[in-house]
Amino acid sequence: MSYNQYAEFIRDETERMSNSRVQLPSDAGLHREVSNTIAKALQHALDLHRKEVFNTRNQDDVLAQVLSKEQALLRDELQRVMALVGDLPREQIGSDLVDLQSGGDSGFISLERLLDDVEKLPRVSLIDEEDSEGEPLLREYNALRHALGEKAMAIREAQRYLPKLKRQARSWQQLQGAVKDVHGAENVDVYFQEYESNVATQAHEACRLAETALKAKGALPREQLESLRRIVTMLRALPRNRKGKVD
């Protein structure tokens, strides 16, 4: 509860108790006038006592004690949280969460459950802004809470893309293996560095041979014509130099 909520609660309770009236039991065996006189005297004494007890100064004292105890309780709770967490550098939180999910150190935790638990952690702030004792602990608690949620969400997003990345990695590994088989392991880097220029050279050579065959025969078979079109399309997709030509 906030300061204003506590103050309103104390004010409402004080007003409720101040409005209560003294009533003597009807079976007390007293004469009606005597009963009324006693009730009025008791009511007057009670009103004087309540006026003294429920004055503004006493209400402020009660409110200050409540807030002080709540701050002490909050510090104890935060200290328990930090003691359980220990001196954990926030940059290691992500890898620790991954270990928990994969069963590292004989542990396992559901990422969705962790996100739900982090969301349920209390959002706390200092009631007294001059409480210098609780400020560093509160700042560390809020930073840890934010880091836990942020890293857990990042891991969840990464898991969505993991299958696609694994497929791409397998395709790349298969391509590397094929290049090693054909050109040798020592020539893999050179092959990829010269890949585009080799493709362009071979495509140009294919076009030249097709042109020679076309001049000699006057026409190309349909299959060869389709192959030539694919080569031209591929050439258009290759990077171009400053003059607008394929390198």
Image (tube, rainbow, N blue to C red):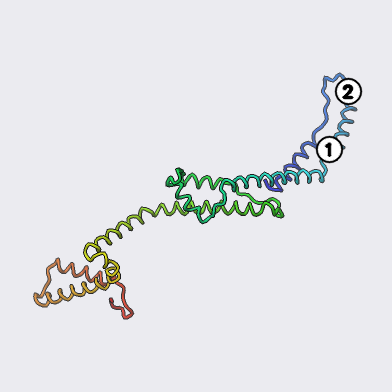
Indicate left or right for 79 with 22 as reference: left
- Within the image, what quadrant is residue 220 found in? bottom left
**Residue at image mark 2:** 32
Identify which amino acid the numbered label 2 is placed on. Arg
Q: Quadrant of the C terminus?
A: bottom left
Q: Which residue is rendered at x = 89% and y = 21% of the image?
A: 31
Mark 1 secondary-structure assignment? helix
Question: How far apart are the two marked residues, 2 and 1, measured between alpha carbons?
Answer: 26 Å
Against 5, residue 223 (above or below) is below
Which quarter of the picture shows residue 186? Answer: bottom left
Judge by depth and name the residue closer to the eye, 172 or 209: 172
The one of 135 and 19 positioned closer to us in this rendering: 135
Q: Position of residue 63 (x, y in %)?
A: 75, 45
User: At x 67% / y 44%, what residue is drawn?
Assistant: 73
In the image, residue 70 above or below residue 31: below
Q: Is residue 140 left or right of residue 8?
A: left
Q: Earlier in the sequence, mark 2 or mark 1?
A: 2
The residue labelled by disc 1 is: 50
Q: Residue furthest bottom?
A: 243
- Residue at 21% x, 64% y is 182
In x, y percent, where is residue 157? 44, 53
